[in-house]
Image: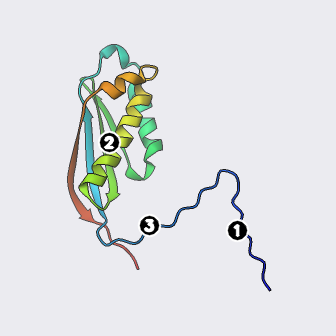
Amino acid sequence: MALVRNDLTWGATRQAPPPPSRDVHEWTVAVESEPVDDALLGLALARFAQDAAQRAPEASPDATLTSGRFGLTLTIVASSADEAAREGGRVFTGALETALWPHADRAAETPYEVRVVQPQQVSTAA
């Protein structure tokens, strides 16, 4: 007779691993905002870059601030351009909220554009 315990510790989550996919690609996603009010910039680039790096460390984010426009270039592994664009937009908006704090409401009002570049096939080892 064997005793099997399947206890979860506090705060633990369990998810099934995603099924292996042959259609996974590396997408280069570039996101750029419209110009932001100069009065809000201060130390914004450092906060923006640090937050993006924490949200998506595997995507090697590269943050810029040029003429009041925040920019972020990421390498995202996804199965479609739409999925890569959504993930890039999510990282960008979160980092922009952090960058513009305590005026995070301005981040939600700031329009931005997402561009996705053709993928490179990612090899999946079996």
Residue 75 at x, y = what percent? 32, 52
Among the two numbered marks 1 and 2 on one chain, the one whose residue lies closer to the N terminus: 1
Look at the numbered disc 3 and give the secondary structure of its residue.
loop
Give the CA distance from mark 1 to mark 3.
Answer: 21 Å
Q: Is residue 16 above or below residue 3?
A: above
Frontmost of labels 1 and 2 is 1
For the point 32% across and 42% down, which residue is it? 89
Give the residue at mark 1.
Answer: 6
Q: Quadrant of the C terminus?
A: bottom left
Give the residue at mark 2.
Answer: 89
How many C-alpha atoms fall within 10 Å of the one at disc 2: few (<14), some, or many (≥20)?
many
How many C-alpha atoms fall within 10 Å of the one at disc 3: few (<14), some, or many (≥20)?
few
Question: In the image shown, does 125 or 88 lie closer to the viewer?
Answer: 88
Residue type, label 3: Pro
For the point 29% across and 26% down, which residue is it? 110
Look at the numbered disc 1 and give the secondary structure of its residue.
loop
How many C-alpha atoms fall within 10 Å of the one at disc 1: few (<14), some, or many (≥20)?
few
In terms of image quadrants, where is residue 47? top left
Give the residue at mark 3.
Answer: 18
81 horizontally vs 95: left or right: left
97 horizontally vs 111: left or right: right
- Circles 1, 2 touching at the beta carbon (< 8 Å): no
Give the CA distance from mark 2 to mark 3.
Answer: 22 Å
Residue 18 at x, y = what percent? 44, 66
Residue type, label 1: Asn
